[in-house]
Amino acid sequence: MSMTMATDEAPPATSKLKDERTSAIAALTQPKGDDLIGRSVTINRPREELFAYWRDFSNLPTFMDNVERIDVLSDTKSHWVVKAPAGKTVEWDAIITEEKPGALIAWTSAEGADVPNSGRIEFVDAAERGTIVRATIAYDPPVGVVGKVIAKLFQREPAIQARRDLRRFKQLMETGEVATAAWTQKQRDEENA
Amino acid sequence: MRALTWHGKHDVRVDTVDDPEILNPRDAIIKITSTAICGSDLHLYDGYIPTMQAGDILGHEFMGEVVETGAKSSLKKGQRVVVPFTIACGSCYHCGKHQYSACDNGNPADNQDIGQEMYGQPMSGLFGYSHLTGGYAGGQAEYVRVPFSDVGPIIVPDGLDDDEVLFLSDILPTGWQAAENADIEPGDTVAVWGCGPVGLFAVQSAFLMGAHRVIAIDHFPHRLDLAKKFGAETINFEESKTYEALMEMTGGIGPDAVIDAVGLEAHGFFVDNVVDQIKASLFLGTDRTHSIRQAIHACRKGGRVSMPAVYGGFVDKFPLGAFMEKGLTLKTGQTSVQHYMPALLNAILEGKIDTTFLISHRMSLEDAPKGYKMFHDNQNDVTKIVLKPGLAAAI
Ligand SMILES: NC(=O)c1ccc[n+]([C@@H]2O[C@H](COP(=O)([O-])OP(=O)(O)OC[C@H]3O[C@@H](n4cnc5c(N)ncnc54)[C@H](O)[C@@H]3O)[C@@H](O)[C@H]2O)c1
Ligand SMILES: [Zn+2]
Ligand SMILES: [Zn+2]
């Protein structure tokens, strides 16, 4: 730190020196590397409305940043195309394994997926605050493969991805749009790439 | 377009950057006619606020003309609007309670991590104020993209000049909220630390809310004179000791309510302040806090502390004991601008609040770097700089 101060006396997190700044920010937001991720968010909308939007899996890419496309194949089966580094994609089929209208959807990847995974989303009334939405996403990587490797496969640590996706879901449901600080379409496309 | 961009400590430049575009249905694009430099911008200028990136466009106090609207904006092309510096969605739980500055949705999802880690909950979005609060491009530019334009901007009635309404964007509501947070009761004596724009509007607001006496504290004679014009008594902290003077003026009781309108860059010649400065520049977990310490020390027993001043991190030697033993209460926060705008616009129309007195300099956007330096170096004479993108550069 003291070496940096000689050329730029600003605090590291505001430093002109890009590396210094990046590592200061990264230290604050470091991924924890879980492969079982549970997250809750409270959304100021009725339970049924949130359930209905989620239940149509083709909607998920509107807020799941790393999901390029989901084709709905039948009432319970869907095909997921997920972004991976270097313009590649990872794909799998998912099957809905449990459903309670207005309350719960659970799904799991079909036999043969590269990265077996499953997800579960619950919707619980929160009185005048709307609905508590609780997501659990689990990855079941081949033996010896840890979260960091999944992150490489998916561009981002799954825990961070899930947390951010839920926030985007909340934004979309509450405001009708996903907030962006970009000021040109080009910038936004780069952020989403 | 041309825009004032941050490149590091004491390094801001006017660059040519891409024009903003409509990206979301509730967006509008505003052509800026007036935009001010704020005391908060000096915190960025001095490098105190983390998560700035080179090229960030500054500016959160601005107004202008609507030139483009998204499908769900309620604004119309040609309307003149003042834009709140807080970006709020209008539909989350907090917005429903008019806590606009606590909006859940103004800050893009990816940017919320930093605030969540630092403060426990993510911050809302603000224009031109670091990536902690969204990383939104600010309004010290020719154009700006305004999200949630159906909730924030207030339409300016015909016949009002920019200079009369520009400060609805931040400092007038901030001074007003500061006085409101002081829970003023009739007969109260209110002390205000700092006679910058926020402090001066807090002085006016405190009188309008029924304060019997307002005591304003600063060391710039010109700024103290402005406070006097509104009926305040004053203390120049270079000439007298603030605590002693306050005790003398209040018959040994202390002010009923105290307002800290100084913040991060408190000036002073006190040992603890010098230590704070060194620590702050090394980012060792302290804000420079002399004004808030002094305010708590002087406040009467059972009194109220209002803190519009901005602090970012941890604080050393915070007088928690005095706070507890005297049974004080503290209210603070970024201003919920949207909540106050309509009533304050009326107050301006009715002539109850004067805003134009504050403007000491008007200059071209091209001269903004000079403006930052002037504001930073000469706070006595420079009370507020308004940039007008329409004006030619002075060269
Ligand atoms: N809460 C919000 O939403 C909000 C909005 C706008 C500004 N702010 C904050 O309010 C504060 C004031 O803003 P401003 O634009 O008026 O700033 P400013 O820098 O123009 O004014 C600060 C004044 O405080 C005086 N001062 C410094 N040390 C002092 C001390 N020890 N005792 C008494 N006075 C002292 C300075 O001489 C100066 O006149 C800043 O911290 C700013 O970031 C908060
Ligand atoms: Zn401001
Ligand atoms: Zn909101």
Image: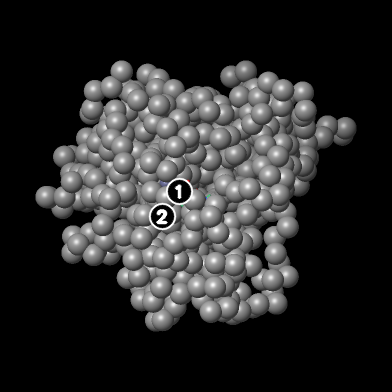
Quadrant housing the N terminus of chain A: top right
The span from disc 1 to disc 2 (Cα, nearest Å) is 6 Å
Residue B384 at x, y = what percent? 36, 43
Q: Is residue A40 left or right of residue B175?
A: right
Q: Are marks 1 and 2 on the same chain?
A: yes
Location of residue B256 with respect to B172 vertically, above or below = below
Location of residue A174 with respect to B162 vertically, above or below = below
Residue found at x 26% / y 61%: B353
Who is closer to the viewer here, B165 or A76? B165
Residue found at x 53% / y 79%: B251
The disc numbered 2 marks a residue on which chain? B
Disc 1: CA contacts within 10 A as few (<14), some (14-19) or many (>=20): some
Q: Is residue B286 left or right of residue B239?
A: right
Disc 2: CA contacts within 10 A as few (<14), some (14-19) or many (>=20): many
- Rendered image quadrant of residue B184: bottom left
Secondary-structure class at tag 1: loop
Residue B337 at x, y = what percent? 38, 56
**Residue with the most extreme front position:** B239
Residue B106 at x, y = what percent? 46, 48
- Report the colour scheme: one colour
Who is closer to the viewer here, A57 or B271? B271
Residue picked out by circle 1: B220
Residue picked out by circle 2: B224
Q: Which amino acid type is marked by label 2?
A: Leu
Mark 1 near mark 2, Cβ–Cβ under 8 Å? yes
Residue B185 at x, y = what percent? 43, 80
